[in-house]
Amino acid sequence: MSTDAPRPARTARLAALCWIAAGVVYVTTEAVAAAAFPGYSYATNYISDLGIPQVETFGGRAIDSPLHAVMNTGFVLHGVFFVAAALLAAPVLGTAHRRTFLALAATHGVGIVLVGLVHGGQVNADNGLGAVHGIGATMAIVGGNLTAIVAGLAARRSDELRRLGTVCVTLGVVGLLAALALVLDSGSSSVDVLPDGVWERLSVYTITAFELLVGIATLVRLRRHETTATRNA
């Protein structure tokens, strides 16, 4: 991306703003919904607990999320911003990575929108829609972390972006390992290394970190290019 090509620069800046918006929307709506949820624990509660509209007990956890609509809106908006950012950023990726990157970003976007539209909880567990929610969550976590890995691999082809690419790949790998640990830990009564909420957030916040990192790094890089171009003019 170079400042001597205004359109690519504008597109890159818009992509960066969408990445940042996705991350900010997610953590903000989560924090707002969690603050209104009596006794909510980031360690033991699932993120999806914040989107359940019923007051109930689910999975042994007391559910009472007055601002469930805020969290569900956050899920949906995050998916929209994530896919928009990926579509805008895709042209700068090499051909070998572009289609995979877009497919994975779409997987994440569709998955997290499903999470926002089809909430968890006992009611949906009883009527069968809980499986749809679970599929959406899996798509979001796996798709998002794989998006970070593919983006990182593409960035590593450039000497200037090699460090950024390495961090993106690392975040994606950590997120996938945390997701695997969540499945193993929650599915076994003999394994309890960390609370489920911690594992889940490790698998999700890596995606948030990827979004914010790429967005901020892109804006900084564009600013540096603009400064250099101005000095050389």
Image (cartoon, rainbow, N blue to C red):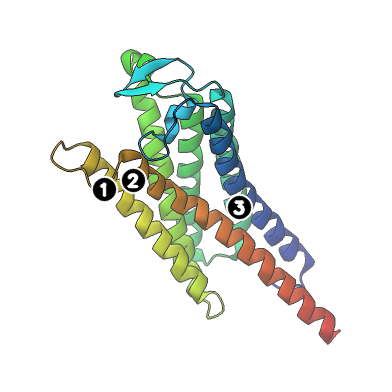
Which amino acid, by three-letter code, is at mark 3?
A: Trp
Pick whichever of labels 3 and 2 is earlier in the sequence: 3
The reply to whether dot 1 and dot 2 touch (C-beta < 8 Å) is yes
* Residue 29 sits in quarter: top right
- Cα–Cα gap, marks 3 and 2: 23 Å
Whole-percent x, y for residue 207 in the image: 47, 51
Which label belongs to residue 199? 2
Whether residue 79 appears in this view of the structure is yes
Q: Quadrant of the C terminus?
A: bottom right
Which amino acid, by three-letter code, is at mark 1?
A: Ala
- Give the residue at x 51% y 59%: 98
Q: Is residue 74 above or below residue 61?
A: below
- Give the residue at x 55% y 38%: 31
The reply to whether dot 1 and dot 3 touch (C-beta < 8 Å) is no
Whole-percent x, y for residue 35 in the image: 54, 32
Q: Which residue is mark 3?
A: 19
Pick whichever of labels 1 and 3 is earlier in the sequence: 3
- Cα–Cα gap, marks 1 and 3: 27 Å
Please tell me how crowded label 3 is: few (under 14), some (14-19), or many (20+) other residues with Cα within 10 Å. many
Q: Residue furthest left?
A: 190
Label 2: which secondary element: helix
35 relative to 193 in the view: left or right: right
Q: Which residue is mark 1?
A: 181
Q: Quadrant of the N terminus?
A: bottom right
Whole-percent x, y for residue 34 in the image: 51, 32
